[in-house]
Amino acid sequence: MTREYLKKASLTAKSNASETHDIVKGILSDIEAGGDEAALEYAAKFDKYTGNVLLTPEEIAAACALVPEKLRLDIQFAHDNVRRFAELQKSTVGDVETEITPGFVTGQKVIPVDAAGCYVPGGRYSHIASAIMTVTTAKVAGCRHITACSPPRPDTGVAPAIVYAAHICGADNILAMGGVQGVAALTFGLFGLPKANILVGPGNQFVAEAKRILFGRVGIDMIAGPTDSLVLADETADAHIVATDLVSQAEHGYNSPVWLVTDDRKLAEDVMALVPKLIDDLPEVNRENAFAAWRDYAEVILCADREAMAACSDEYAPEHLTVQANDLDWWLERLTCYGSLFLGEETTVSYGDKATGTNHVLPTSRAANYTGGLSVHKYMKIVTWQRATRDGSKAVAEATARISRLEGMEGHARAADVRLAKYFPDEIFDLTANG
């Protein structure tokens, strides 16, 4: 059987790219030309905030003091998990060298970028976990300077829990500035900050577009769109848990797609019946997003068997992928395109979003076809080097000269020729392209 859509999305998760691009480009140009003053003007306009933007040690301490002890312990728990996982990731790559041919040594060196800018959303929700995910990984990578940037709220500033999380995770500075103006401040090195070498962290479409425009003059983790999630479930799955997981991700935003892929019609129908009830039971502030996301962007897809389900999932390349089905090892081996994988009912995307240690800054809009999520490796440059003895360079020089001439790059060939002439003056070499 072909795929049967029991529910089909009426919209796709794309904003008005052209309009957003023009707005963002104009703001970036204004701030690059106007510096600190222009950034402050945009902060007053969009953040409705006129307080101090670069938090002092005293302001950081005061904000941290407002965080309840239980929340501090939860943040520390999540930070410890993220740090340990980042340290494990870092251990998988390191400096190496090898004698590629006798007398010719090549190597790899891993160097962390100097300055990282970590954007932490703080609009509708205070994304405490994003501060933990971005700052901790930068710290473990070895970045010498880390700035956390988050939108302030009028008259109150950055949420104290975000300040606390960024501080204990290792941020050197905390910038109370949101949106494009915050991204610009990190990139252009405003307010006395070092210019960021890399920008990381989630944000709305304006933040994402700013990162897209700036990519090249500064590194980025990825260009992210609305968050998306897919659940693979068979007849063994609990319909209530599946529905709850879908709703939990739909609340991210009105344009956040959630997808159910199954080979069991009854499960699909049960989930579709449950979701509206679960959305209705949410607090009003969450209900609006979840309702719109389910109505306009969600899909329920019926497949013939688990192989067809897996193929469908790989095609969608979801940011978050949950498997609630038999034989989890088969799914782990078979699935290839996802940002982060959650195997079995006993785990859920919410765990990964907040506290398990794997990063929640992940590829969206099918970018999981070619990249993974934020990791300690994103902050690390893998560079190469080489060294040779004169005898060791001989065979390489000969091959280089001939290949270069075959390509028509005579200057390259002569860079090899002069070394052969200097090091081996008594030898004759045939360095023609067809020699």
Image (spheres, rainbow, N blue to C red):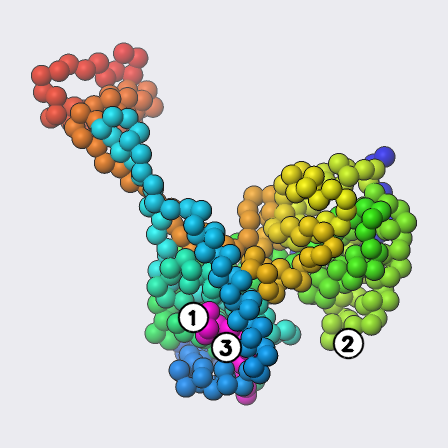
Q: Earlier in the sequence, mark 3 or mark 2?
A: 3
Measured as percent of width and height from the top left, residue 4 is found at 85, 43
Q: Residue furthest left?
A: 426
The residue under label 3 is which amino acid type?
A: Tyr
Q: Quadrant of the C terminus?
A: top left
Instruction: Give the spatial CA distance, label 3 vs label 2.
Output: 28 Å
Asked if residue 22 can be seen in this view, the reply is no
Read off the residue under disc 3: 164
> Which element carries disc 1, helix, strand or loop?
loop
> Which element carries disc 3, helix, strand or loop?
helix
Question: Residue 284, which numbered label?
Answer: 2
Read off the residue under disc 1: 171
Left or right, 140 with respect to 422, comes to: right
Task: Please name the residue shown 76% across and 66% down the image.
Answer: 290
The residue under label 2 is which amino acid type?
A: Glu
Verify CB contact (< 8 Å) between mark 3 and mark 1. no
First to last magenta residue range: 155-171
Measured as percent of width and height from the top left, residue 366 is found at 63, 48
Q: Nearer the viewer, residue 208 or 325?
A: 325
